[in-house]
Image: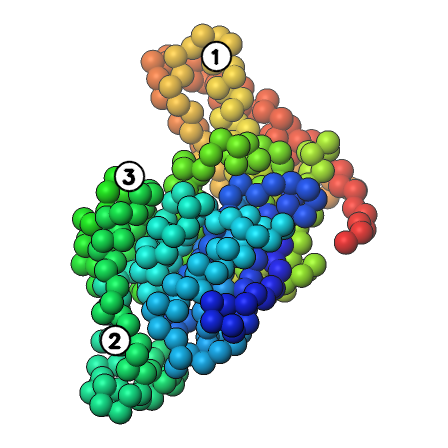
Amino acid sequence: MINEHIRFEGAHGDTLSARVSRPPGAAAGGTVRAWALFAHCFTCSKDLKAAVNISRALVGQGFGVLRFDFTGLGESEGDFADTTFSSNIDDLLVAGRHMADAPELGAPAILVGHSLGGAAVLKAAGEMPSVKAVATIGAPFDPEHVKHLFDDAKDEIMEEGLARVRIGGRPFTVRREFIEDLATHEVERAIGELGRPLMVFHSPIDNTVGVENAALIFQAARHPRSYVSLDTADHLLTDPADSWYVGSVLGAWARRYMEEGEEAGASEGEVGEGAAGAEGSGADDHLPAARSDRGGVVARTGAEGYRTEVRARQHALVADEPESVGGEDLGPTPYELLSAALAVCSTMTLRMYADRKGWPLEEAEFTVEHSKMTPKEAEAAGEVGGAGGVPRLDLFRRELVVRGELDQAQRERLLEIADRCPVHRSLSAGVRIESALGEG
C-alpha cells in the first residue's frame, strides 16, 4: 500500500493534515477502483488504529482513501476550541473538493464516518454530488448526543462561555458556540433526503453511542439501506479484527454501487494488497506490483510484528502468526497457506476429474493438517529425500469428504486422483528455490 502525507487549506484557513492511501499499482499508471473520504470520530484523529485498518482493508480491494484530521486535532492546525459541528462539515466538504481538484486523486465516491464523523458525512453527502455511497460506524442519530461527554461542565460552559473538559483522558476546551451549534442540525432530514445507498455499522454493546442510534438512522433512511451488527466490538473498534471486518465488508458492499468504468479498473492488475500492520509512509509502504508475465506473488512484512501483505495479481490477503508466538493472528500462518494450497489444488483437481467423467460430485472438501516429524519418526516411516538423503520431516495429513450420489468405488477413485494434483506432485517431488536480490 502506498501512503502519502498531504496538507491542504481547511474551510476556515487552517492547514489540515491528511493521509492518502492507494493500491501499489496506482503508482505505475493503474487506476483506483474509486475514492473514499474518511471522517474520524469526535476528538480522535486520522491515525486512530481503527481508521488505519479500515483504510488498509479498502485499499486491499482497490479503493483509494483520504482521511484527514479535523481542525485543531491530530496534525492539523487551528484550535479545537474554535470549532463546531458545522465547521467539521465545512472541513469535510473542503476535503472532498481537494480530492476532486487534485490530479493524482479523484472526487470521493464513498463517504465513511466514525462516531460524530458519521453524523458529519450524513449531513455533508447532500452537498457532494460525486458521492455514490455512504457508511457510518457507531454514529449518533443526533449530533447533540456528544454533549453527554461533558455533562459535568455543561452549566459552566453555558454560563462562562467555555470550560476545560476531559474527553478520552485528554483535555479539551469546549465553548458555548459548540453546544449551540449542535442544536441547529437536522440530521434526520438529511438522512431521509440522502438519496444514496447507506450502510450502518454499529455494535449492540456500544457504551458510548448506544445501538438505538443505529435503529433511528436506519429507520430514517430510504432504500437501499443496510445494517451490520459489530457483535462484541467497542465504540472505538480497539480490537483490530473488528476494524478489519468493517473495512472488508464495506469494500465488498461499496463495489456494488460503483460505475462499470470504475469496476473495470480492478481487472488491470492495479488492485492493492490486503495490507495489515503498522501505518507507515513513503517508499517503505510501496508494495511492488507482481510481474504478471511470470505469475509473481508479492509478500511484504512491515517494521512491526509479523503481519504480512500478500498479493497475487489483483487478489489480496493478509498472513500473520498466532498471538502465542508474537503475532496478532490477523491471517493464516505460512504453513496454513501452504496447507491451503494443497487443499485447494486437491479439490479443484477432483472437480475437473468428476466433470470429465460425468460423475455427480456435488462438493469435495479436504481438511489438511501440517505437522513436523522427528528424524526418527521420518526414518521409521521410510521417508528419505532432499539433499544428501536427509529424511523429509514435514507431514501433511489430508482427509477427504465428498458429497453426491457416488458409489464406494467412485469415492475411492477420487481419493486416488487427489494425489495427482499439481501442488501434491510438487511437494512430493521436492522443489528447487532460487533467490536473488532485487532493486527496491
Disc 3 marks a residue whose amino acid type is Pro
| Residue located 23% across and 63% down the image | 142
Visible residue check, residue 200: yes
Disc 1 marks a residue whose amino acid type is Asp
Pick the residue in front: 54 or 26: 26
* Colouring mode (rainbow / by chain / secondary structure / one colour): rainbow
Looking at this view, name the residue that lies furthest to the top: 358
Q: How far separated are the C-alphas under marks 2 and 3?
A: 33 Å
**Residue 180 has which mark?**
2
Where residue 137 sits, quadrant-wise, is: bottom left
Task: Residue 310: give x, y in percent of width and height.
Answer: 59, 46
**Mark 2, mark 1: which one is toward the viewer?**
2
| Residue located 48% across and 12% down the image | 355
Pick the residue in front: 121 or 436: 121
Task: Residue 25: give x, y in percent of width and height.
Answer: 65, 44
Visible residue check, residue 248: no
Pick the residue in front: 265 or 53: 265
In the depicted structure, whether residue 188 falls above or below residue 5: above
Q: Are marks 2 and 3 in contact (CB under 8 Å)?
A: no
Q: Is 379 situated left or right of 76 in this image?
A: right
**Residue 355 has which mark?**
1
Disc 2 marks a residue whose amino acid type is Glu
Pick the residue in front: 84 or 138: 84
Q: Is 202 situated left or right of 259 in this image?
A: left
Mark 2 or mark 3: whose residue is earlier in sequence: 2
Q: Residue under label 3, please give it.
A: 224
Mark 2: few, some, or many residues within 10 Å (few <14, many ≥20)?
A: few
Mark 1 or mark 3: whose residue is earlier in sequence: 3
**SS class of the residue under badge 3?**
loop
